Image (spheres, grey):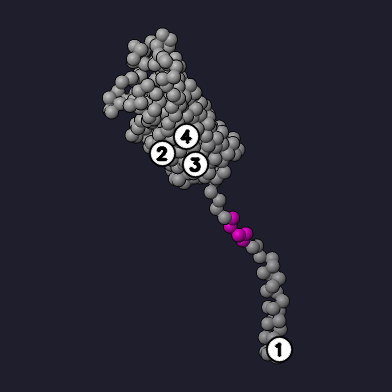
Amino acid sequence: MKKVFLGLVAILALIVTPALAADMPVKAPEAPVVSPEYNWSGFYVGANAGWVDSSYNWRYTNPVPVTCCAPFSASVTDAIIGGHVGAQWQWSHIVVGIEGAASAFVNSSWASGAGCINTAPAFVCQIQPQEVETLGGRLGYAWSNWLIYGDGGGARSGVASRLNAGGITADNTESTYKNGWYAGAGVEYVLMRGSFFDLIGGVEYQHIDLGNQTQLSSLDAFSACPPGVNCRNISAKEDLVRFRLSVKWNPFAPAAALAARN
């Protein structure tokens, strides 16, 4: 009798246990923790460094005699260092901003070309690029920690020119600033998110066109041409690639968003 009772208990346990298990609440699996989308809105300041290739064309505007001088073209490559500051706002994945930047030439090399003056072949025409300044807008597309953008606006750069023979300057112009435009593109990545500031790295390319400008000559006492005969019309273009490191602060981010980032 005892054995029969134990057998019935075992059979009942086999029937009841699965039913009870089916009625027990099941804990849902925890959702994976997803890092919030980065907000590119805010103000930023940073430093940049890279290379620039400068191309120039030189043509005398009123030479005497007319056959004395040949058009002269030259280019020079140099390293640049500088800084930038800007502000931007993000709507969904679209980022709109404004930025000003300035870069100085490290070596300040002269672009040289011989034979530009047929009547005095010993003289070499030389042009020296100087600092580059840009101010314009940015339009980009952001996803997560990445931002790809295009930019463009106004550009300004100093340009000096001279004639040189054996290290002796025979004709020098004061450095003049040429105004033009620039257009480019770049990509940035958030290197570090902080409680108050973020660190962003990037690389960009810009093409700068400074147009044409007439430079007056010291040989003509810097007078116009005519009556001067040594004025030159100089056009300048620059292509630069630079690496960027920026510190960004977003005063518009709510406290909850700041807490979620950390």
Q: Which mark is residue 239?
A: 4
Tag 1: residue type?
Answer: Val
Query: Mark 3 or mark 1, which is nearer to you?
Result: 3
Within-10-Å neighbours for mark 2: few <14, some 14–19, many 20+: some
Q: CA distance from mark 4 to mark 1?
A: 96 Å
From the image, tell me which residue sits under label 2.
50
Measure the C-alpha gap from mark 3 to mark 1.
Answer: 78 Å
Q: Secondary structure at mark 4?
A: strand
Contact, mark 3 vs mark 4 (Cβ under 8 Å): no
N-term mark: 1 or 2: 1
Q: Which mark is residue 188?
A: 3
Q: Quadrant of residue 24?
A: bottom right
| Residue type at tag 3 | Glu
Indicate the amino acid at tag 4.
Asp
Q: Residue at x 50, y 32 (%)?
A: 207
**Could you tell which of marks 3 and 4 lies nearer the N-terminus?**
3
